Image (cartoon, rainbow, N blue to C red):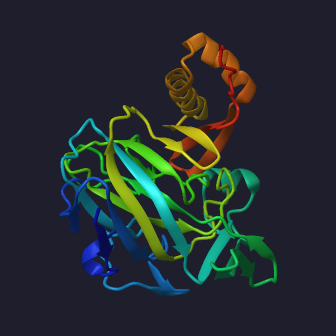
Amino acid sequence: MTLHEIPLERRTLHGHFSRDLEPVVTIDSGDTIAFACLDSGWNVEPGTKYEPRDPELDAGHALIGPVEVRDATAGRTLEVSVDRVVPGAWGWCGAGDWSTPLNERLGLTTGGVYLHWELDATSGTGRDDRGRELALRPFLGVLGMPPPEHGMHSTTPPRIWGGNIDCKELVEGTRLYLPVPVDGALFSAGDCHARQGDGEVSQLAIECPLERGELTLRLSELEVGTPIAWTPEAWVTFGFHEDLDEAASIALDAMLELMGREHDVGRADALALASLVVDFRITQVVNEVQGVHALLPHDALAFPTNS
């Protein structure tokens, strides 16, 4: 299998999803891409934006790609193996100071705060400008493909083909499975988060550049209708919808299907067991559509074998 180094340059950066974008590289199933990326806000360093940047075409997250995968046809499944995520040396986060429904409910549309972080990928720690230290858990917030419709599409909402999932579980060692929406897949990635909590309630994680990411892309025989992931700790299924209840239902439906496949149980049996061993979490509440993910720990269902 081949390692493809994708340089960080104007040609490889974009700020929207579209099936009309030309691929920056074409790879075979099983190949690995390696790349660096700007932070989500197109910052080269704190306070300095990347130039040139088109205000319309680059309005969204700074993404690397798209990557064309040979033989990836619409309706197949793309497996994204997260092999390496190394954050850059700095990051930032904040809260308040802008109008969102949540900020309005909390009375935090003015008087916000911004925190600047020094990040040490070797020790896995970050320290903010007030001296507070946190352990890092880096992941890529955006992993996905464009909708099948032609034209420009925002990078903000997650979709069934991935995108701005913003799930803190998708760390190194993860395998993410996505339905392929268009021939060639046209996969893009970016939005490195050095650390984030479930919900991403302020609208920001520790936003940081990506020093190096390595992803292996391969076609899978696993059939999925919504993103699912195998992480070092659990199976994870996702639901995205404007209504949080609907998002939860979508994630649960996918989890019941997964449990049936992995553990050979019927749907009602799976639901009964899910009520005991599956954890539901709010992925994020800030990306225009709500995200819910369901987690089934790998050791949760250790059925004895009949001898």
Q: Is residue 177 above or below residue 23?
A: above
Looking at this view, is 221 or 273 the one in front? 221
Q: Residue furthest right?
A: 131
Can residue 288 be seen?
yes
- Residue at screen point 27% across, 42% down: 181
What residue sits 18% from the left and 56% below the top? 20
Q: Quadrant of the C terminus?
A: top right
Q: Is residue 28 above or below residue 89?
A: above
Q: Give the x, y percent position of residue 102.
A: 67, 51
Quarter the N terminus occupies: bottom left
Q: Is residue 218 left or right of residue 162?
A: left
For the point 68% across and 66% down, which residue is it? Answer: 95
Q: Position of residue 67 (x, y in %)?
A: 27, 61
Whether residue 292 is visible: no
- Left/right placement of residue 289 relative to residue 306 reads left
99 left or right, relative to 16: right
Task: Residue 39 in the image: state x and y as whole percent.
Answer: 49, 74
Specify the farthest residue to the front.
Answer: 307
The residue located at (52%, 52%) in the rendering is 174
Q: On the image, which quarter does residue 92 sit in?
A: bottom right
Residue 120 sits in quarter = bottom right
Tally of numbered tags: 0
On screen, residue 131 versus residue 27, left or right, reads: right
Instruction: Note whether 44 is above or below 239 in the view shown.
Output: below
User: Can you give x and y, in whole percent of width and height, for residue 257 in the image?
Assistant: 50, 23
